[in-house]
Image (cartoon, rainbow, N blue to C red):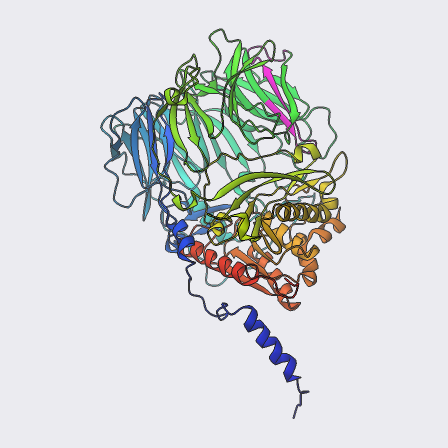
Amino acid sequence: MLRFPALPLAPFRFACLASLWLAPWLPAQGDATYRTPSPALAAIVEAPLTPLVSLSPDKKNLLLLERPALPPVAELAEPELRLAGLRINPATNGPSRETYYTGLVVKPLAGGAEQRIAGFPAGARLTSLAWSRDSRHLAVTVTLPSRLELWLVDLASARARRLTDRALNGVVDTPTWVDDATLVVSLLPAGRGPAPVAPTVPSGPVVQENLTGKRPARTYADMLASAHDEALFEHYATAELALVALDGKVSPLGLRGLIGNALPSPDGRLLLVTMWSRPYSYLVPVSRFPTKVTVHDRAGKLVHTVADLPLAESIPIPTGSVRTGPRGVTWRADAPATLSWMQALDGGDAGREAALRDEWFTHTAPFTGAPISQQKFALRASGVTWGDDQRALVTESWIKTRRIRTWLVAPGAPGAQPTLLFDRSSEDRYGNPGSPVLARNAYGRAVLLTSTDKSKLYYDGAGASPEGDRPFLDELDLATKQTRRLWRSAAPHYETFVAHLDPAFTRIVTSRESVTEPANYFIRTLGVADDAQALAPITRFPNPFPQFAAVKKEVITYKRADGVALSGTLYLPPGRTALDGPLPTLLWAYPREFKDADAAGQVKESPYRFIRVSPLGPLPFVLAGYAVLDDPTMPIIGAGKAEPNDTYVPQLVASAKAAIDELVRRGVTDPKRVAVAGHSYGAFMTANLLAHSDLFAAGIARSGAYNRTLTPFGFQAEERTFWQAPEVYAAMSPFNHANKIKSPLLLVHGAVDNNPGTFPIQSERFYNALKGHGATTRYIQLPHESHGYRGRENVLHLLWETEKWLDTYVKPAAKDGKK
């Protein structure tokens, strides 16, 4: 008979009683019922969403896109296949978890009654909206329970009708206008049989091999994993291209396969088609499968082969590395049918020394001659903003140095010396010139808006400054490179440029908001000083969060011990006064890497923006009596050749301490009642702060990665592999320091997280490590949720978990000098 030594009962009883006293609200481990937070927090989830808007190409109508509240978990639980980096609903043969609209309303900018678009099926989900270039029609993908359909909205009658009986294949491609009377669409193949059935008995093992060469890859989710996966992927992703006319006539093009997209040329005569093929990969997503790029006429006949690219499993790890061969192949927007693409000169390897990185090519139909080399670039070129033969903009950048340059080039003079317009750091928000204002040309394509004499461009930007963001509209003289400010947002409002209504820039459309006024759209007459006369309202959206009207918002600035300037947005509960004393506080943050300390210290918010509340962020807890410091900057700086992450932990702790010290100095915060929280890399930050400091009473970490050996070929902005910098990976992995975490930590993860590196196993293993070392911890896995959370019941439950965690471990006043 086996005998076991008796356990000491008194300590055991004490531990049990202590656990019950500390966490009386915790349900049994097997209790899987959804909970609801306090009414104030639940009301945020139920608040109606303000419609999104879309301006018609002729700028005569504003389309209001009505959005539903959070979908029920039942919607997320619909069938889903996760294949080759895609998430597919097999019932509809379209993407799963797609954002959709429930209604469309047309609002004339010139005034007059709104018109609701009628005719859609009851309960239909509306996605993939596309204006015809004459603004007379909208193409809309309608998602029904068992298929995707193409519908057409006639703006004049405000009615929608189904355009064809053929079902769409929406796995990758969406309907695109070829001209004002024709769309190119991907259809389900005619005569397609049933989906492949998984074998009950495998025919053999799953085998992967590498016989030659290095093939490092970041950690991707939802990859193919078996022959059956390959068969399913082919079944659902295979489509047939066709043209569809406004009368519903379908003209098949004879092109069938794994179609990535079909882009019409500006003159509508040709189609640029991207298709994928075998061999597939179990390591990288579909975008890196063998890819063929071809040009076809409107009958489907092959006109030209642009590229036939092999499987790209061996793209080097350093950020800025790219696939070799033509990339970003597209049409020149200001010409009838000219192709444009970039091509690497450095083997696509950002880790290789090279004087020149990229070459830019164009090729004009009928593609009889060789492609024309337009320019070569010392940095990685990202694309072209077209204007005309004398004016186009090309941007090149290099992540390692944060350098970004914008060139003015003349496509009509290949090889001519380009003019450097901007040469700056991508980290420098204060020096950001903004983005060029675009206008539609005769082809309906967006091109550079120029002055009448072609000597000037127009730029709009965020207007970052030490006093916060103040959006602007500038005129740029191309000869002198000097700017003239046409307009700038002024306190106490935050106003952004949306579109111009006339070539002279006398009237523009703006979006305008304040701390207590939600964003609405206006027509602003420039040059009129009095806003009462300058502004004509287009929309009058109500405030969806009136309970936040009395919340105090302030952008605060402070410094880290090493002198780095920091900032964040502080929110205080309604009615709070200095007489109320210090509050329990929640810090919600996300660290970022910088090469320059001055840039890291730049203010990145506006004190005048509307308090826009997400149930997934920290602001709901202002109504629960907490001070909230949202997005306090947590810069990780590596100047010169230094790598930011070599000093990740001390910099992180120093930034957190500086934030708390400032809040204490202001009399806002009780330093013994502060929680830290974050999502994704913010969750990673949270766990590290609890492991390496005693600053916080509790932490909440959502959908993070905690063991960096599971992302061995780099993560976030870290380019070095685990084998190149094992000490950095070890120091930064909170999993390795689970034994040091003493403050209570709430872990949350979506059950089907698709973000690279943040697989649910990260939270599962971290929870096990914490539990094994006696930490106070709780792990919540939200059913059917991806990296971001959407299900109504899940979000309500998340708020309940967070509220109870904070109320238990942070809100109560500390006793006996302890947290």
Magenta region: which residues?
395-416
Q: Outermost residue toward the bottom?
A: 1
Residue 77: image location, x then y, percent:
40, 55
Q: State the residue at coordinates (65%, 68%).
A: 772
Q: Quadrant of residue 185?
A: top left
Q: State the residue at coordinates (60%, 43%).
A: 632
Residue 753: image location, x then y, percent:
52, 52
Q: Outermost residue toward the front?
A: 579
Does residue 415 belong to the magenta stretch? yes
Q: Name the quarter where the N terminus is drawn.
A: bottom right
Residue 655 appears in the picture as rendered = yes
Residue 439 vs 621, above or below: the answer is above
Number of marks present in the image shown: 0
* Closer to us: 623 or 645: 623
Residue 192: image location, x then y, percent:
36, 45
* Closer to us: 96 or 486: 486
Residue 773 vs 681, above or below: the answer is below
* Closer to us: 107 or 631: 631
Residue 429: image location, x then y, percent:
61, 29
Q: Quadrant of residue 784?
A: bottom left
* Closer to us: 463 or 133: 463
Using residue 169 as the reference point, say whether residue 283 is left or right of it: right
